[in-house]
Amino acid sequence: MTKYYEVFIPGSLPESTYITRTMSSGFTYEERLMQALSVSGYLTLISGPSKIGKTVLCEKVIGIDRIVEISGSDMINPQELWIQIGTKAGMPHTGTTKSGRYKADYMEETFSLTKESVLAYFKEHDLVLLMDDFHYASHEMQIFMAQQFKDAIRKGLRVVIASLPHRVDDTIRTNPDLQGRISIIDMQTWNRDELKQIPEKGFVELKKKIPKKIIDLLTMESIASPQLMQLICLNICVLAEGNDFSIDETLVKRAFRFSTLNLDYDKVVKIIQNGKNSRGQKRTIYQTNTLGTIDLYGLILEALALDPPFTDISFDDLYNRILKLIKGKNMPSIISVKNYLKNIQDVLNANDRSYEVIEWKDNIIYIIESLFLFYLRWGRGTTNDK
């Protein structure tokens, strides 16, 4: 009998609930990636929002055993780039080679990892380098890696870089050294018809019924993330077990809250709520319709958490959400909200990479981590029991 944890797999490559998506060109992402990897001397860039399935696509097409995956956040020291890549591939950092059977011709030599030895190892074992979360590396390190990979792909190394769509334009897309040597795969956000295939296929596999209105609810709350959909469906199964597997809206909302238990975003929320040091100036407090009194940092968080969830939102739409939360005539100005958004961006940037959950850029608020928005909606007590 198939187990639910064999069907819904949020953390790695799913088998029965893997969904093949078609690009606007009519070809699948799998076909496009196979084509890109077949072209010698080209670097492959997969660009798309967080938790959209970039790594899972690579695992499906390339095979988990042939991928050497490294995160951009691990890339700090340029001098250790190839040592880190080789070590991750399973090569010894240093060692000794011995030759000759007799004392007269016996030789012993030490060796260490070099770029050339790493390239030879990758070619011999038919490996592909996956540089995930490339945007987490510093700008200087990104430029260095782009230069190094230009030479490496000429020598036969296959490199796939995965990153967010608005984070790699300077160092990869517009890098003159790589012009004419990049295969770009822009992964589009999952639409609702694509997302709903995960619960449809999964619950059929488990021989369980799930109402259409519940699938619609799951699709909305998954915030265009197949990983989040997999997680929610898995937790529905956990909570429904021993309950005759009766799935209704009450159980699904419990599953939403249940799915936030391992999401450690409480510190991020507090950082945003605290905002920048006001240097003795009192913050303006606003009266809301349902949340009591709250300052502008809190209003921004609550506005982000409102229906419907999104992957990016314009400033005008966010501002209108804020106004709808407020009771009375005391409204924040457009300039004040923009200044607070800048302050939020500053305090998040001042912390480590785990705090990079949203980005305020060019009058648009991008949700970098869909799991963070899901946490805002369902992980903060009972205020969001919609």
Image: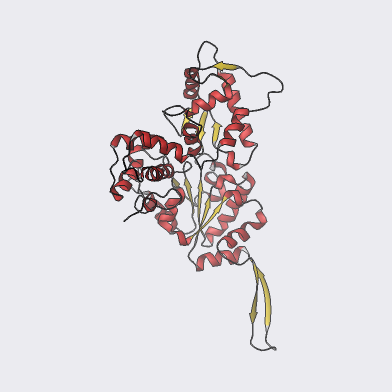
236 shown above or below 31: above
Q: Position of residue 82 (x, y in %)?
A: 61, 59
Q: Quadrant of residue 86?
A: bottom right
370 shown above or below 59: above
Q: Quadrant of the C terminus?
A: top left
Q: Residue furthest front?
A: 242
Q: Residue furthest top?
A: 329
Residue lying at 68% horizontally and 85% vertically, measured from the top left: 106
Residue 172 appearing in the image = yes
Q: Position of residue 94 (x, y in %)?
A: 65, 68
Q: Position of residue 193 (x, y in %)?
A: 32, 39
Count numbered badges in the picture: 0
Q: Position of residue 303 (x, y in %)?
A: 49, 25
333 or 237: nearer the eye?
237
337 or 273: nearer the eye?
273
Q: Quadrant of the N terminus?
A: bottom left
Q: Residue furthest right?
A: 280
The colour scheme of the drawn protein is secondary structure
Residue 38 appearing in the image = no
- The answer to whether residue 368 is left or right of residue 240 is right
Residue lying at 46% horizontally and 33% vertically, measured from the top left: 378
309 shown above or below 37: above
